[in-house]
Amino acid sequence: MKATVRKLVGPAGLTRFVCLVAVLATVGLLPWLSHRDPALTVLRARSAEQEATDEALSAIREDLGLHDGPLSLLGGWAADLLRGDFGTSWVSGYDVLPSVLAGLQVSLGLMGAALGVAVVLAAALVAPVLVRGRGSAGAFAAMLAAVPEFLLATVALLVCGVWLGWLPTAGWAGPEYLVLPAIALGVPAGGLLGRLVADALPAVLDERWVELWRGAGVSRARIAGAALRRVLPPLVPQFGMAAVGLTGGAVAVEMVFAVPGIGRTALGAAKSQDLPLLQGSVLALLLLGLVAGALAALTRRRLLGPALRDAGLTLPPARPVRTHPAIPLTLFTVLAVTIGWGLLRDPYTLNTAARLAAPSWAHPLGTDALGRDVLARLGHGAASTVGTAAAICALSLLVALALGFLPGIAAGAADIANALPPVIVGILVAAAAGPGTGGAALAVALISWPALSAHAAALVQEVRASAFLTAQRAMGATPWWILTRHVLPSVAAPVARHALLRLPGIALALASLGFLGLGAQPPAPEWGLLLDESRAYVERAPWAALAPAVALALLAGLAVSGAAAVQGRRPRRTTAGPRGTLGARAVRKETPVGA
Amino acid sequence: MSDALLEVRDLVVRYGEVTAVDRVSFSLAAGETLALDGPSGCGKSSTALAVLQLRRPSSGEVVFEGRELTALPERELRPLRPRMQPVFQDPYGSLSPRHRIRDAVAEPLKVQGRWSSTEGPARVAELLDRVGLDPSYGDRHPHELSGGQCQRAGIARALASEPRLLVLDEPVSSLDPSVRAGVLNLLADLQDDLGLGYLFICHDRAVVRHFADRVVEMRDGRVISG
């Protein structure tokens, strides 16, 4: 996301450009990529009573340009786009551009409000650290950052909207409709921002200049201001990623609160196979993400000034939140016992006599709308969600290990992958291949590798720079021997541990796709889907919605506390050798670990 | 100088625009210690890397045991590499933290196809004994040894390749003075017994005067005396 001229023209710039073109081409080729015949969709939409004869379908294919092959389809789409023609909706027959613009307007309003919530929350988390001068925002901020938007939105809707009845829960008719969605969207972002700043501040406040300023009688307020000014520039790229996350979170929040924004438009278009509308709204979402990233890069340059363009100002290593290992262990045990118990029960048997039953001995967590046992569905859902997440982790690990050796190429691709929230990739994959567990897994896998590959690249660089590898070459070892006996073993183990730490976060991403109907399909007991199905009956049977919500919250807690416990325990190992030795110039980099 | 073990002629090493080593020439006979002396940044280590062909020189010749190395492709160079071995400054960094001392010393034998499960372990024990380490240290990892012990293990690993030339890059600079003398004495004994040639890189005048037969002094990439 650092847009320096040097990076734009290197291999990273090239791959970034190639990946961007690939993403745009995927959007443009959706009608061709989609395995299901789009002609049928259009025919149904245009005239429900017309027979789906071969001639009728063929005429529609001709009309859509599907006969001419993918290249001319892409060319036509791009040419229309440049003329400002986004096409017409297959379903409604209206122009796409006005619907996209209307949705964009609503979404920008919502995101602006959410950003306000985020800034207020971040300030509230950072203020105590600035006042006390030490400590950190603690596990609370980390927890807020880890809770997925769809879960927060559902809980906010239940508590404030349905039970307390304070605020409207659906629609977009006035400022009061903005409150709940903005909170649901803004709180995770605010938790992330607050946590980043609050974790970095204590180390900065311990720097020499603070002592000096204090001794010189500078007011505390001015020192606090200067410390903030010192902390912000290196963190701005991460703020850009948080803004990108907002575009993905907006899809879930807009769906829960029935806000007619761009995210909901994209989701609806994906479900009804209305590809022109989908192309238009996904393009708008991508544009939002890229603009957010570019703004972040620009802000960073403004803050740094002309003298310190690139990595000139680094922060002292942050002191991460430390957790007692008992906390993740307890969370893990509670989840494991619940899942194990549920696995022994039958998740598919319908019992219409016991619909929406309250918890009892026969059904410890009650039953759902079809009389199925909630505990059993929770247990079996975990097996598929966590199993899929484990497969994704293994896949990202392989990708990361391969790309760790090609950091130039990986950096550009990672920039694009970071600019895409999982929900948007999920929408694209679902539109191309139809919604399903495999598609959701592919979508999450496509964007979950960058953090791992950055870690792998740092380790490869560190090992390659070490003197013992030079000794290997000197004794006549082949590159293959060095790779398999020394480099891979030193890199694979730490990156694999990192991948394991990301498992709960990946499971949450899968659940959010399931919640939006882009992942596992009914009657599969997937956690996100479980939460979505039980939402409709929440007033009569709150436990059916509460069970998956609590389970997801526990998973988020596990993601945070597990990472914190490992990070707190690990001693900082420095391999930096003395200067001026034969090739021994170890490179130490911050290895990113976390949810 | 037909009896020279190593002959370096007009060696040039460039890193991009910067010329680190500028037309350096010297020769070294078997059983002789030649010291490269000079302030830090004067091109000593770059010269050592270029002699070892671990960084290919930009121009010039490196003739080792009568063969010119700079023009050889990597594949033809590999069988010759064991004949000249480096010993590094950082005793811990030069051994893989993940491997036991025994495995580190055995690795040249395995890489060069001279390992056998019957004779290999005895050869490793013999090498450890040769550098003054009790063979029981073979079971330890580098971080369980002192700096001097690690440096001895590094020398044992170099000896496992059965070299004729050791390139010693500040081998005692990061050791305590008391340990330093022990390692220097070990190196002197090995030279007497095995007839090794030493290219000895050091910026400590006292050590150089005591240890080296001849001194080549470098400054700004050039030889200024020797």
Image (cartoon, coloured by chain):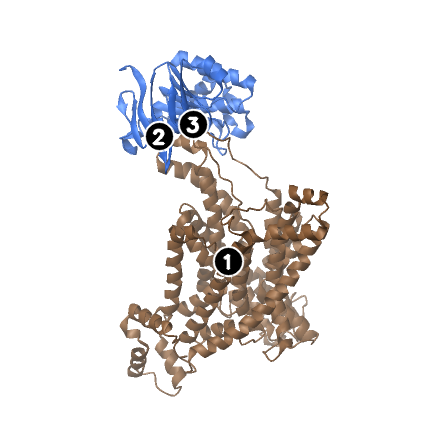
Chain colours: A brown, B blue
Whether callout 1 and callout 2 share a subunit is answered yes
Circle 1: residue type: Leu
Q: Quadrant of residue A42?
A: bottom left
Q: Nearer the viewer, residue A417 or B40?
A: B40
Task: Name the residue tied to disc 1.
Answer: A298
Mark 1 to mark 2 CA distance (whole Å): 49 Å
Task: Name the residue tied to disc 2.
Answer: A476
Q: Nearer the viewer, residue A49 or A218?
A: A218
- Whole-percent x, y for residue A496 in the image: 50, 47
- In this picture, is A288 found above or below A193? below
- Whole-percent x, y for residue A406 in the image: 40, 47
- Report helix, strand or loop for mark 2: loop
Q: Quadrant of residue A364?
A: bottom right
Mark 2 to mark 3 CA distance (whole Å): 28 Å
Q: Nearer the viewer, residue A491 or B188?
A: B188
- Report helix, strand or loop for mark 1: helix
Quadrant where the C terminus of chain B sits is top left
Label 1 marks a residue whose chain is A
Whether callout 1 and callout 3 share a subunit is answered no
- In the drawing, does residue A44 fall left or right of residue A126? left
Is residue A320 visible in the rendered image? The answer is yes
Q: Residue at x 43, y 73 (%)?
A: A280
- In the drawing, does residue A396 fall left or right of residue A213? left
Quadrant where the N terminus of chain B sits is top left
Q: Which mark is residue B42?
A: 3
- In this picture, is A514 found above or below A592? below
- In the drawing, does residue A390 fall left or right of residue A130? left
Mark 1 to mark 3 CA distance (whole Å): 42 Å
Q: Give the mark toward the camera: 2 or 3.
A: 3
Label 3 marks a residue whose chain is B
Circle 3: residue type: Cys
